[in-house]
Structure formats: structure tokens, C-alpha cells
Image (tube, rainbow, N blue to C red):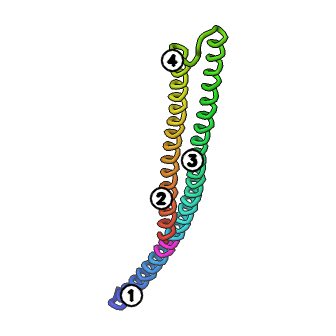
């Protein structure tokens, strides 16, 4: 083999290497583009999921706020019913005592009806306190759902900014 043949072979090998290198670079560029397209699609999908979760958290927040209001209303109504029941019980006690010839506004008879009124008031306060506790728990839950909604909103925006 002569020097010319070796030079031609060397040039040919270099040309083939260059073509192979260009083909490899093109393949890498296509792969990078496909990966970027996939990541973009996943980011958009994750953003939509976060947006859906945000909407659900806001619905849950609204539900918890309504439940808090409902607890207060139920506590108020149940307290009123308890006050009425206590007054009715005192009326029955007084009627029974009076029917038996007992003076209802003095001594033990008065103590009995006073104790009944006190116990009834304590029950009403307990009912209202329990309702307020339930409402406070629901309000805390509503705040938690609100925070969760904000976090999902941020996540959604972050996912869209990945592009």
C-alpha cells in the first residue's frame, strides 16, 4: 500500500467518523427534544392535578365553614329547647307540689325548683359550649383547607413555570 492509499484511507475514515459523529449528535438532539416535550407535558399534567386539588380544597373549606355555622345554630336551638324543657319540668314540679298542698315559693319546694332551674341552665351552657367547640374545630378545619388550597395553587404555578 502506498502513501496515497493510506492518505485516502485516512481521509475516508475521518469522513466516516465525522458523519457518524454528526448522526450521533442529531440523535442526542432528538432525544433531548423528546425528553423536554415529555417533561413539559408532565408539568402541565401536574399543574392541572394541583388546580383540581385546589378546587377540591376550596370546596372542603366552604363545607367546613358551613358546618361551623350549622354547629352554632344547632347549639343555639338545642339550648332554647333545653330551656323550654326545664321550664316545663319546673311547672310540673310546682303543679305536683301545689296539688299536694305544699307552698311552692318557700322552703324545700323552692329549693327543688331552683335546683332544677340551675341544672337546666348548666345543661344549656354545656350544649352551647359543645356547639362552640365543634364550630371552632370546623373553623380550624376550614383554615387548614384554605392553606391546602393555597399550597396547591402555588404547586400549580410552579409546575407551569417548569417549562
Relative to residue 73, is residue 158 depicted above or below? Answer: below
Magenta stretch bounds: 28-33
Sequence-wise first label, 3 or 2: 3
For image coordinates 51% across by 13% down, the residue present is 108
- Alpha-carbon distance for marks 2 and 1? 62 Å
Foreground mark, 2 or 4? Answer: 4
**Which mark sits nearer the N-terminus, 1 or 3?**
1
Q: Nearer the viewer, residue 139 or 22?
A: 139
Q: Determine the residue located farthest toward the bottom in the rendered image.
A: 4
The residue singled out by tag 1 in the image is 11
10 Å crowding of disc 2: few (<14), some (14-19), many (20+): some
**In terms of depth relative to the viewer, which is nearer, 60 or 1?**
60
Which is nearer the N-term, disc 4 or disc 1?
Answer: 1
Residue at image point 55% right, 31% down: 124
Question: At numbered mark 4, what does the secondary structure look like: helix, strand or loop?
Answer: helix
If you read the primary sequence from the N terminus, does the residue marked by circle 3 or circle 4 appear first? Answer: 3
Q: Residues within 10 Å of mark 1 (few under 14, many from 20)?
A: few
Amino acid at each position: 500500500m502506498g502513501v496515497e492509499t493510506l492518505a485516502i484511507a485516512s481521509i475516508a475514515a475521518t469522513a466516516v467518523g465525522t458523519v457518524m459523529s454528526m448522526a450521533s449528535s442529531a440523535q442526542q438532539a432528538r432525544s433531548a427534544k423528546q425528553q423536554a416535550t415529555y417533561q413539559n407535558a408532565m408539568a402541565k399534567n401536574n399543574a392541572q392535578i394541583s388546580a383540581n386539588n385546589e378546587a377540591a380544597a376550596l370546596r372542603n373549606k366552604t363545607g367546613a365553614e358551613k358546618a361551623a355555622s350549622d354547629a352554632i345554630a344547632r347549639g343555639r336551638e338545642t339550648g332554647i329547647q333545653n330551656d323550654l324543657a326545664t321550664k316545663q319540668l319546673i311547672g310540673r314540679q310546682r303543679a305536683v307540689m301545689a296539688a299536694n298542698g305544699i307552698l311552692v315559693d318557700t322552703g324545700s319546694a323552692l329549693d327543688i325548683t331552683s335546683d332544677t332551674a340551675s341544672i337546666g341552665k348548666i345543661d344549656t351552657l354545656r350544649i352551647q359550649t359543645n356547639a362552640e367547640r365543634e364550630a371552632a374545630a370546623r373553623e380550624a378545619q376550614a383554615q387548614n383547607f384554605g392553606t391546602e388550597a393555597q399550597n396547591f395553587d402555588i404547586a400549580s404555578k410552579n409546575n407551569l413555570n417548569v417549562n
